[in-house]
Image (tube, rainbow, N blue to C red):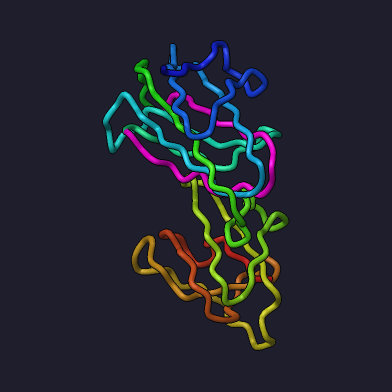
Amino acid sequence: MATFELESNGTLATATAVTLGSAMNGQLSTSSDVDWYSFTATGSGLVSLVFDAPTNDSYSTNYNVGLYNASGGLLREYGVGRDSTLNLGPIAAAGTYYIEVESGYYYSNGQYAATVNFTAGSVSNYESEVNNTLAAADAVTLGSAMNGQLSTSSDVDWYSSPRCPARTPRRLTRRPKRPGRLATAPVWSAGRGKFVCSTWPILLAGCEWLQARVSIA
């Protein structure tokens, strides 16, 4: 039997509880309607969501789907227009988390289905959201991979590590030739400038090196 959202679930406080691994059916009655869902995680792990959309558009956003913590802080968000499996990323602790579904740039009043999945395990090598300020930077271990993702075009991820070996810093000012190019240009923060200190790959995503927002301090 299909399971449907309970209206009104337009706020975090009135969120409809979902069962992990089971589809929840919903519908946005107007372009300003918002559907909230809650689920409980027993510990750290990775969250994904299978979104069955009534639309089939690869280039338009009909729905915005976001993962929020218990305080209502946005952890990750996607814009979708077709059936999608969304990697909503890691959560570091047990507790109640929330999924928000709202209209994207284009509105659809069709029925959608959302299935939340959770895989328990260590997330020590994943970024922790929100890490979009220097003060909230995730600590990394030199030589070990850190998994991260920019959930929106305005998202910023900060990382920190032990100070690099002493050397004369060289200011880095050149621009990458191709957007999204993978470059070996590690930087450390010194005041408002960024300086080369060792080899560490970063994804520039078409920005100047100084705008990469990566800090090894």
Task: Name the one closer to the observer, 109 or 31.
Answer: 109
Q: Residue at x 63, y 60 (%)?
A: 124
Is residue 93 part of the magenta span, yes or no? yes
Q: Position of residue 151 (x, y in %)?
A: 49, 46
- Side of 205 where 148 appears, left or right: right
Is residue 25 part of the magenta span, yes or no? no
The count of marks equals 0
Q: Position of residue 56 (x, y in %)?
A: 27, 30
Q: Residue at x 61, y 75 (%)?
A: 142
Q: Residue at x 48, y 72 (%)?
A: 201
Identify the image quadrant of the C terminus. Answer: bottom right
Task: Name the one closer to the observer, 210 or 28.
Answer: 28
Task: Name the one closer to the observer, 126 or 157.
Answer: 126
- Side of 166 where 84 appears, left or right: left
Q: Residue furthest bottom?
A: 167
Q: Residue at x 35, y 69 (%)?
A: 177
Task: Name the one closer to the observer, 83 or 204.
Answer: 83
- Which quadrant would residue 182 be assigned to in this image? bottom left
Rendered view: 208 above or below 98: below
Identify the image quadrant of the N terminus. Answer: top left
Q: Which secondary structure type mostly characterizes the magenta part of the structure?
A: strand
Rendered view: 216 above or below 44: below
Q: Position of residue 128 (x, y in %)?
A: 63, 52
Rendered view: 84 above or below 111: below
Q: Which residues are magenta?
A: 83-104
- Side of 162 where 5 appears, left or right: left
Q: Position of residue 45 (x, y in %)?
A: 59, 49
